[in-house]
Image (cartoon, rainbow, N blue to C red):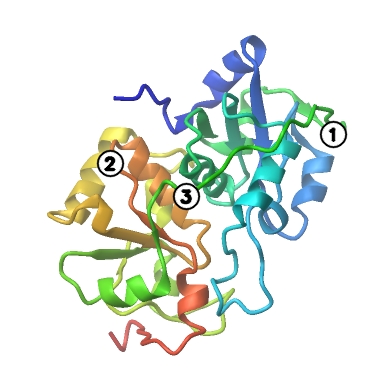
């Protein structure tokens, strides 16, 4: 049994590590002004990773793999090298949306290529600032390294065809982590059509968090997801969102809770809704 570290690290633990150990801190904020915001203010020594540029290969048509398809192994290998990441590196990732805005996605990607020493900062940027972690607007200088060896995704992945089979199979469960209004088809801020995959259940990723934006304790999450899964095996569980980013927030929650990491449907609603597949809303299930 491996002695893998916890998938989450508290701001207090980060402060202690930052002054005593050689860690690589990654700012994974996403959105239009993410890099500008990073340049204006980031946790001291943090290196920036861009969701669209570094953690995905964005295609012209989201019908082919969704809005944030995974990058090729060669591209990811180069990204990790440019960030100075070695297989032995201890990586701590944060964003400004409680881990849902690419921090958990990068965590999942690193875990999926076999990197064990990777954690997400519980509470994110805001909580680190609140307890006095050093803030900087300086350009961070660090050494690049040789390309990271990557041969496969070691964690489970589902494609659109597997979803079509799984959604009608009682031995599988498909979990949509978007907020309830999007799942119900009442609103859709990002994709062309509102609704959800018929047969999927809605467990918003926001429910992984307490009122202060921290993940619930591992025991609480374990109880919750064990009840949701029931007799369904974790390997027959598929988690998705809009484009395979916030779904990773729930994959991290389950890993933190001691549940084997389920399959990720990267294409998610952004791919499903652009192909000729059945769709449902609250009124039309």
Q: Position of residue 269 (x, y in %)?
A: 47, 73
Which circle, 3 or 1, is nearer the viewer? 3
In this image, 88 relative to 79: left or right?
left
Q: Position of residue 42 (x, y in %)?
A: 75, 35
Q: Position of residue 206 (x, y in %)?
A: 43, 53
Which label number is shown at residue 259? Answer: 2
* Residue with the mark numbered 1: 137
Task: Kindly report the distance in space between the C-alpha atoms of the residues bearing marks 3 and 1.
Answer: 35 Å
Which circle, 2 or 1, is nearer the viewer? 2
Q: How many marks?
A: 3
For the point 53% across and 66% down, the residue is 243
In this image, 158 relative to 147: left or right?
left
Depth order, front residue of 176/170:
170
* Residue with the mark numbered 3: 153
Which circle, 3 or 2, is nearer the viewer? 3
Task: Kindly report the distance in space between the C-alpha atoms of the residues bearing marks 2 and 1.
Answer: 39 Å
Residue 237: quarter of image: bottom left
């Amino acid at each position: 049994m491996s002695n893998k570290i916890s998938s989450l690290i508290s701001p207090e633990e980060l402060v202690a590590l930052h002054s005593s150990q050689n860690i690589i801190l990654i700012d994974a904020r996403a959105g239009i002004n993410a890099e500008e915001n990073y340049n204006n203010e980031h946790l001291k020594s943090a290196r920036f990773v861009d969701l669209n540029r570094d953690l995905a290969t964005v295609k012209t048509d989201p019908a082919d793999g969704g809005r944030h398809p995974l990058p090729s192994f060669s591209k990811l290998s180069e990204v990790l090298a440019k960030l100075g990441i070695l297989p032995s590196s201890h990586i701590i990732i944060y964003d400004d949306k409680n881990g849902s805005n690419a921090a958990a996605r990068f965590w999942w990607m690193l875990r999926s290529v076999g990197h064990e020493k990777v954690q997400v900062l519980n509470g994110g940027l805001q909580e680190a600032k609140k307890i006095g972690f050093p803030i900087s607007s300086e350009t961070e200088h660090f050494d690049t390294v040789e390309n990271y060896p990557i041969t496969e995704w070691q964690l489970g992945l589902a494609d659109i065809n597997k979803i079509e089979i799984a959604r009608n199979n009682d031995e599988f469960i498909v979990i949509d982590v978007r907020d309830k209004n999007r799942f119900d088809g009442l609103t859709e801020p990002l994709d062309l059509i509102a609704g959800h995959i018929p047969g999927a259940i809605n467990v918003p990723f926001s429910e992984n968090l307490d009122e202060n934006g921290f993940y619930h304790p591992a025991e609480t999450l374990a109880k919750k997801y064990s009840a949701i899964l029931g007799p369904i095996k974790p390997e027959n569980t598929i988690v998705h969102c809009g484009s395979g980013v916030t779904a990773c927030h729930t994959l991290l929650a389950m890993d933190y809770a001691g549940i084997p990491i389920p399959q990720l449907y990267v294409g998610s609603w952004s791919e499903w809704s652009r192909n000729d597949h059945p769709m449902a809303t609250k009124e039309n299930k």
